[in-house]
Image: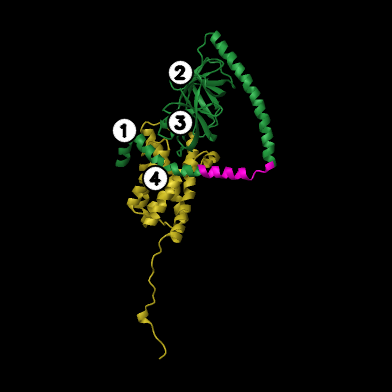
Chain colours: A green, B yellow
Amino acid sequence: MLLTLTIMNLPSRTKARVKQGIASLFASPFGLTRSAKETASKAGDYILPRGELIKQNDALRLENERLKLQLQEAEKMAKENEHLHKLVGFQQRTQLKLRPANVVLHDPANWWRAVKIDVGTRDGVSNNLPVLTIDGYLAGRISSVSLTSSQVVLLGDPNCKVHARIEDTGDTGVVGASGPLDSEFVEMNYLSKTANLKPGQNVKTSGDGGIFPRDIPIGKIIDTHSVEYGLATVARIKLGANLNALEQVWVRFK
Amino acid sequence: MNWFSTIIVFLTAFLAVFWEAAFNGVRHWVGAQIDLLPALMVYVALSGSIGMVTSFAVLGGLWFDSLSANPLGVTVLPLFLIGLVIYSNRELILRDETFAQFVLGLAASSSVPIMILLFLLTTGHEPLFGWGTIWQLMVMSLGGAIATPLFFEFFNFVNRVLGPRTYSESSFRPDREIRRGR
């Protein structure tokens, strides 16, 4: 009991360092698991027949040509877009700085929704940076960082609250915790009772709150219900991110 | 418990914590991850000394908390309390009976998460908590209950096959040999 109380009352910085030190013990088993997976996939590559490889090569060549055309088209559109932005006086949008990361473990406790990723302070990661899925949906935020890894609290965890807005109407609310078993859905609270909410409307970050930049997609409204004797509305949101199947993510730098 | 069994138990605990964090299949399937540390604590409390129970609670708890968003040290006390209760009453427990191991595993695997949750809630943390928690506790309890007799079987097997053998003195003594013939 004395030990527990001592550890729990250590300064938060010391506690974080001790925690990261102990967690680093698990680095070698994770490395082993990853190299075993890679070896298995390489073994699969060797047994692929030659005919199949040629077929895939042809298909990829065609795809490459098509993508080149699309890229040229996109470059034209980007120039035109930039020009229009300048014309209407909007502030030129800064390019997103993204860093890819692999999810190396999930929280073993059932009462937190968190994962660890394989980038840390040596990659320039710091606390509270937004983490996105590969398709660009919000997944969570960085909650603690060590030299080589970081912990990400995911949407639905009580420690990951996001100020969000409904794209069509501009109504704002706070995306908060979900139930222990609902990893696909979260609740958006503190919506006005007069808000014009419909299923299918997109929910994005509002940019308020100081952590998440504006316009990161979160998900879509599924249904709504009144709370607090009709004074407020709560919307149930289906997350765009599949948090159960996170393998790779983007860390978005500010 | 000899040094060999002690090493095997700690190695198993380390791998159990690693498995809980690295492999998410059970959580996808039934909605909750099984915690194997309480089941291992049942084995330690019935087979080891009080020192072993304490060091298992400290190391196992710290390993678990280091990979979790739990505050560091929160798992140590519940694990130790469960170990202490079983250790104090082990003279009354039929430790070789599979049913006794199952029931102890069930009790330990349900008490430890409940104690951790109470500890978190009373220290101002905000864990995910709701009706779904009851289902998760049921899965954890049942998983731990099934794992406990399996751990006993596993450690008995490992000790039998790889552990140092106890030397049994033969009843034959050459000085008492009856020589026949001339």
Q: Callout 3 environment at 10 Å: few (<14), some (14 to 19), or many (20+)? A: many
Quarter placement of the C terminus of chain B: bottom left
Chief SS of the magenta region:
helix
Q: Position of residue A187 (x, y in %)?
A: 51, 25
Question: Mark 1 vs mark 2: which is more N-terminal?
Answer: 1
Residue corresponding to mark 2: A208
Q: Position of residue A95 (x, y in %)?
A: 51, 20
Question: In the image, what residue type sits under mark 1?
Answer: Pro
Instruction: Tell whether B74 sits left or right of A95.
Output: left
Foreground of the two, A65 or A182: A65
Query: Mark 4 belongs to which subunit?
Result: B
Question: Which residues lie in the magenta part?
Answer: A34-50
- Measured in 3D between alpha carbons, the distance from the residue under mark 1 to the one under mark 3, in whole angstroms, is 21 Å
What residue is rendered at 57% in x and 45% in y? A40
Task: Identify the element where label 4 is drawn.
Answer: helix
Above or below: residue B53 compared with residue B32: below
Question: In the image, what residue type sits under mark 4?
Answer: Gly
- Measured in 3D between alpha carbons, the distance from the residue under mark 3 to the one under mark 4, in whole angstroms, is 23 Å
Mark number, residue B60: 4
Question: Mark 1 vs mark 3: which is more N-terminal?
Answer: 1
Residue corresponding to mark 1: A11
Q: Callout 1 environment at 10 Å: few (<14), some (14 to 19), or many (20+)? A: few
Foreground of the two, B116 or A201: A201
